[in-house]
Image: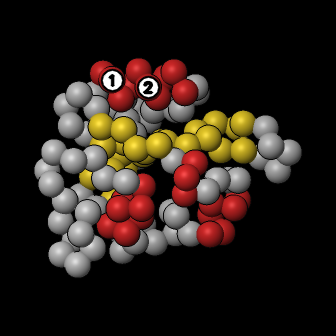
Amino acid sequence: MNKENNKMNANSTPTIYDIKYNTIEKSPYFFSRDTLKFFHQAMNSFKVKKSPSGRIFIYAKMMDHTGKNVGYTFREYRDNDLKTIYNDDGSMFYETSLTDIQNFIQEH
């Protein structure tokens, strides 16, 4: 991504740093130092994946203060924002495992 004109090739997958830059207005605290610290995450904890249909998703492990995995942060990057994920029936998707996340991305 060229930060000067803030445009990406439509076929490219953004980096997590591109996503942070593009979501700062709509989601200013999502990647803040305090938020990342609370969930024991860093920018390089996040994976960015493009689904077969072209949707962009991000995910990262969340850890508690003891270092135990307590779930995953999982969002869709769309319209310069990070959207909560919903199942096809409209219910909220709960990130129970990395396999669940990977399967969801592959199916959407």
Could you tell me the amino acid type at mark 2?
A: Gln
Q: Percent position (x, y) of residue 19? A: 36, 59
Furthest toward the bottom, the residue is 4
**What element does badge 1 sit on?**
helix
Residue under the point 44% across and 26% down: 102
Left or right: 95 as drawn, with respect to 51: right
Task: Give the color scheme: rainbow, by chain, secondary structure or one colour.
Answer: secondary structure
Can you tell which mark lies on residue 55?
none
The label shown at residue 102 is 2
Please indicate, yes or no, whether residue 73 appears anywhere in the rendered image.
no
In the image, farthest residue toward the front: 2
Location of residue 68 with respect to 26 vertically, above or below: above
Query: Mark 2: few, some, or many residues within 10 Å (few <14, many ≥20)?
Result: some
Nearer to the camera, 7 or 57: 7
Name the foreground residue: 9 vs 105: 9
Please name the residue that numbered disc 1 is placed on. Answer: 106
Residue shown at the point (24%, 69%) measured from the top left: 2
How many numbered discs sit on the rendered protein? 2
x then y, percent, for residue 53: 19, 31
Q: Is residue 67 above or below residue 15?
A: above
- Report the residue at 14% width, 50% height from top: 10
For the residues bearing labels 1 and 2, Cβ distance under 8 angstroms: yes
Crowding near the residue tagged with mark 1, few <14, some 14–19, many ≥20 C-alpha atoms within 10 Å:
few
**Residue 47 % position (x, y):** 47, 43
SS under mark 2: helix
Identity of the residue drawn at 70% across and 37% down: 70
Question: How far from the left and from the top, in percent, is residue 8?
Answer: 19, 59
Task: Give the answer, above or below, for where 33 lies relative to 84.
Answer: below
Q: Is residue 43 left or right of residue 93?
A: right
Compared with 43, 90 (above or below) is above
